[in-house]
Image (spheres, grey):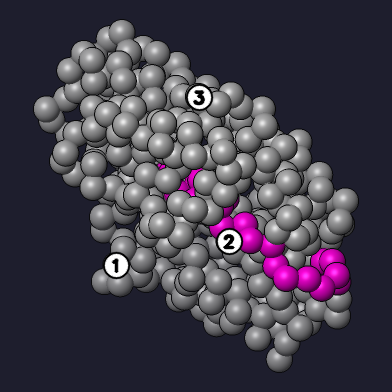
Amino acid sequence: MSTTTHQPADTRSMGIVHSALRRDLRRARVVLGSPPHPDDARRRAIADHLTWMMAFLHMHHTGEDAGLWPLIRSRNPGAAALLDDMEADHLRIAPAVDALIDAAFDYRTDPDARDGLINALDRLSDVLLPHLEREELEAMPVVAETITTAEFRNVEHEYFVKPKGFAELGREGHWVVDGLGDEERQMIYGVVPAIPRFVLVHGFARGYRRRADHMWGHGAASRIGPVTPRHEERIMTRRLAHNGRTESYADAPPEAVFEIIADVTRVGEWSHECRGAHWVGPEREAAPGVRFRGTNRSGIYLWSRGCEFTVVEPPHVLAWKTRGLMAVLDCTEWRITLEPHGRGTRIVQTYEVLRIAPGLDRIYWFLVKGHRDRRAALGEDLGRLAELAAA
């Protein structure tokens, strides 16, 4: 990381924009999923708004890829891996954005296409919401420590304000600040120079409010305000996250950490959920194709899960797949990557749901409350793993 000292850049505007995206995705999900369903005029307004939001999201990601990330790369070479992940996320999100645009177009002309639009919203949420959260919690602190507030504002103006017309900024500004307090409103409006800011604030408010009231009505959707990561927790879709990432540091070499994670009989020493595991078959060392079975507990639920190693590259990578009912019901890949970092080891744990039966993730969401937001518990797992390795 950069060793230059300065006051951390104020990047709060990025989180405010993300919260507006989360807010209206949730509003749309509530309106589409709750009877009475939108009539013709309201249906078209919602479809048009979602299409506009996807165009906004595309320009937002383009501005980051073209302006913000290259600046951070040039100043902070140590952030390259994180920035690579951010750009890769954008590539994964793009097909879901295109699918939502197509679904909104269909719904605009055919009310029977409502279920397809709901499904497209859910698929976008699966890839977009974790990315927005990680960008705020991991990437923005790196941005803050690398550049100044003035430099961050310059990027905002050059890539997020300057390419847009006056009417577009008027619509976008009121959309972003919907539900914000005075301080946050002034922060967003401060990106625009004083004279045009006055026109934007006072000249477009009535039109935005009229459109918003038409789309969201005066029921539950209208009461949904800006949604931050801490409050989001998959509430919109009531489905479990299909991927996740946790990181920690061990004051020990990669070999010491790998020795612990490769011995499945020791998993109960550091995992909050897997209470123990045993080898299946004659093999007693981790290798691709070697199988083991773990016993898990979360709340009142106790279950067993068969697993199989898929990647074993000592002392840097260990990956395995869980196999629920012969991998028919669900299959998740877990991966732990160990990278030398100073005198110790950077531990990165990721998981990705490769297969799950339709509706099963919603059932899990309702039953296994500990899986609704696993970040803290998985982070504590890596902390215990780091302590074991250091000892």
What's under tag 2, amino acid-wise?
A: Leu
Q: Start and end of the magenta stretch?
A: 1-22
Image side of residue 283 versus residue 73, left or right: left
N-term-proximal mark, 2 vs 1: 2
Question: Distance from label 2 to label 3 (Cα)?
Answer: 32 Å
Classify mark 3: helix, strand or loop.
helix
Disc 3 residue type (three-letter) = Ala
Residue drawn at x 71%, y 75% as measured from the top left: 249
Mark 1 touching mark 3, by CB under 8 A?
no
Residue at position x 71%, y 91% from top?
391
Query: Circle 1 sits in a helix, a strand or a loop, which is it?
Result: strand
- Which one is earlier in the sequence, the residue at label 2 or at label 3? 2
CA gap between label 1 and label 3 equals 54 Å
Q: Earlier in the sequence, mark 1 or mark 3?
A: 3
Quickly name the residue at label 1.
301
Q: Mark 3 points at which residue?
A: 167
Residue of label 2: 137
In the image, residue 118 lies at what x, y percent? Answer: 32, 29
